[in-house]
């Protein structure tokens, strides 16, 4: 049994609608897990307290910037 392309369009539309309904119903269930994951990733990617030592700065008095026309 074969179905023509035009006859299959409503079936494809119904499948897409069903997939959208499933996604809408599962999204609230997955939201708490997504929040916990986002918080964990945010804490992992948070910059660590690192110090920068400027005591050995280069001699900037000897450097010049010349702009020419």
Image: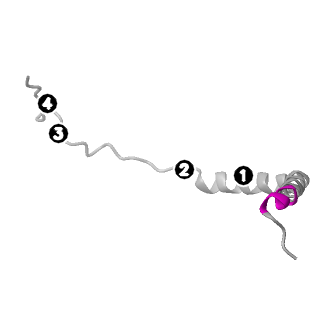
Residue at the image point whose x is 66% and y is 56% from the top: 41
Q: Is 61 rendered above or below residue 9?
A: above
Q: Secondary structure at mark 2?
A: loop
Inter-mark Cα distance, 3 to 2? 30 Å
Seen from this angle, which residue lies furthest top? 69
Q: Secondary structure at mark 4?
A: loop
Residue at the image point whose x is 62% and y is 57% from the top: 44
Magenta range:
5-11
Q: Position of residue 19 (x, y in %)?
A: 85, 58
- Judging by the rendered image, the residue that carries numbered circle 4 is 65
Give yes or no for residue 9 being in the magenta stretch.
yes
> Predominant secondary structure in magenta?
helix
- Judging by the rendered image, the residue that carries numbered circle 2 is 47
Which quadrant is home to the C terminus? top left
The answer to the question of whether label 2 and label 4 lie on touching residues, with beta carbons closer than 8 A, is no
Residue at the image point whose x is 84% and y is 54% from the top: 13
Relative to the observer, which residue lies in front, 2 or 57?
A: 2
Q: Name the mark nearer the viewer: 1 or 2.
A: 1
Inter-mark Cα distance, 1 to 2? 14 Å
- Judging by the rendered image, the residue that carries numbered circle 1 is 39
Whichever of labels 2 and 4 marks the residue nearer the N terminus, that label is 2
Whichever of labels 1 and 3 marks the residue nearer the N terminus, that label is 1
The answer to the question of whether label 3 and label 2 lie on touching residues, with beta carbons closer than 8 A, is no
Q: Position of residue 46 (x, y in %)?
A: 59, 50
Residue 60 quadrant: top left
Q: Position of residue 49 (x, y in %)?
A: 52, 49
Q: 48 left or right of 27?
A: left
């Amino acid at each position: 049994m074969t179905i023509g392309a035009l006859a299959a369009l409503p079936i494809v539309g119904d499948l897409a609608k069903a997939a959208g309904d499933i996604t809408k119903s599962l999204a609230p269930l997955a939201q708490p897990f997504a929040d916990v994951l986002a918080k964990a990733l945010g804490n992992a990617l948070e910059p660590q307290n690192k110090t920068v030592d400027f005591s050995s700065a280069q001699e900037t008095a000897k450097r010049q910037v010349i702009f020419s026309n």
